[in-house]
Image: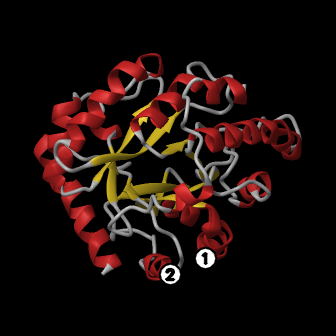
Amino acid sequence: MQAVVAAGVPGLRRSPSQWANQEESPRFPLIGFTKPFQNHDPERTADLAATVGWDGIECPVRSGGQVEPERVADDLPRFAEALRRRNLDIHLVATDITSLQTPHAVSVLQTLAKLKIPRLRLGFFQYPQDRPPIDRLNEIAPALNDIADACRDLGLQAGFQNHSGAQYVGAPVWDIYSLIRNLDPKHIGFCFDIGHATVEGGLSWPIEARLAEPYFTAVIVKDFYWKKVDNDWKDNWCPLGEGMVNRSFFDWLKRTSYHGPICQHHEYDLGNPQQMIAHLQADLKTLKEWLA
């Protein structure tokens, strides 16, 4: 399958030196995930991103997302063009890809390479309840190796998002690390989510962050606090700065060698369109203050 991917895009295999020349400016492009307004067309999406003040977006290219995978070759260029006319860009796409056999995976990868969109976020993997977790990791490893090979040939970088929850591969962070530790971070790594890492890590999130940092492909930020509901504690997502995510993470991030996008995710209720923009701008203001 690797040969199929590479053959589909002649001349797109890149050397390490070419990768080294592709750092964005500024150091941390501040972008937003368009999931809350993924019904917008390219022009409205680009206008909203510019209004909020982002440097670009993370676009959901997945089933039920802003771009359906079977239409990626037709629709994603329209979003890229609309953003680039406003000096913005697509810095990351969220996909369903969990192997090269995922429907339309090859087309998605080829289209990203053609459009010079360097990063993608992989789909989610889950642990079955009736089998040992290590068996699931052993199943996943070959697929990640194949994805890394394809990304190497196309000049792409796949990222595995850590997600909180008892069923998710990646919730403990160490399991992702065990899968990719021997792979080249130029081709596969972490879309490190400090919100989910704090949900799962509690006080240990600095350890998980340090473990993952050499493999950062993107950093995802959102905030939460614990709330008791019906005698059970639930993670309650909230505006940035109102929850438990510690701004010291960003002080630490500035001291690392990471150069890449920081992406705002929003899981709390954003209200009507006017309220939504105000919330997105307020979270961006907080993020900028934390990075100052």
Judging by the rendered image, the residue that carries numbered circle 1 is 206
Q: Quick one: SS at disc 1?
A: helix
- Between 181 and 80, the one nearer to me in the picture: 80
Q: Which one is in front in this view, the residue at disc 2 or the one at disc 1?
A: 2
Residue shown at the point (21%, 47%) measured from the top left: 49
Judging by the rendered image, the residue that carries numbered circle 2 is 252
Q: Residue furthest top?
A: 70
When the figure is inspected, residue 119 is found, relative to residue 290, above or below; the finding is above
Rendered location of residue 6, percent (x, y): 63, 30
- Give amino acid for label 2: Trp
- Give amino acid for label 1: Pro
Q: Quick one: SS at disc 2?
A: helix
Residue 53 visible from this viewpoint:
yes
Residue shown at the point (32%, 68%) measured from the top left: 26
Cβ–Cβ under 8 Å for marks 2 and 1:
yes
When the figure is inspected, residue 79 is found, relative to residue 87, above or below; the finding is above
Residue shown at the point (67%, 23%) measured from the top left: 4
Rendered location of residue 191, percent (x, y): 54, 54
Q: Residues within 10 Å of mark 1 (few under 14, many from 20)?
A: some
When the figure is inspected, residue 44 is found, relative to residue 91, above or below; the finding is above
Q: Is residue 195 left or right of residue 83?
A: right
Quadrant where the image shows the N terminus: top right
Q: Residues within 10 Å of mark 2 (few under 14, many from 20)?
A: few
Quadrant where the image shows the C terminus: bottom left
Q: Is residue 200 left or right of residue 194?
A: right
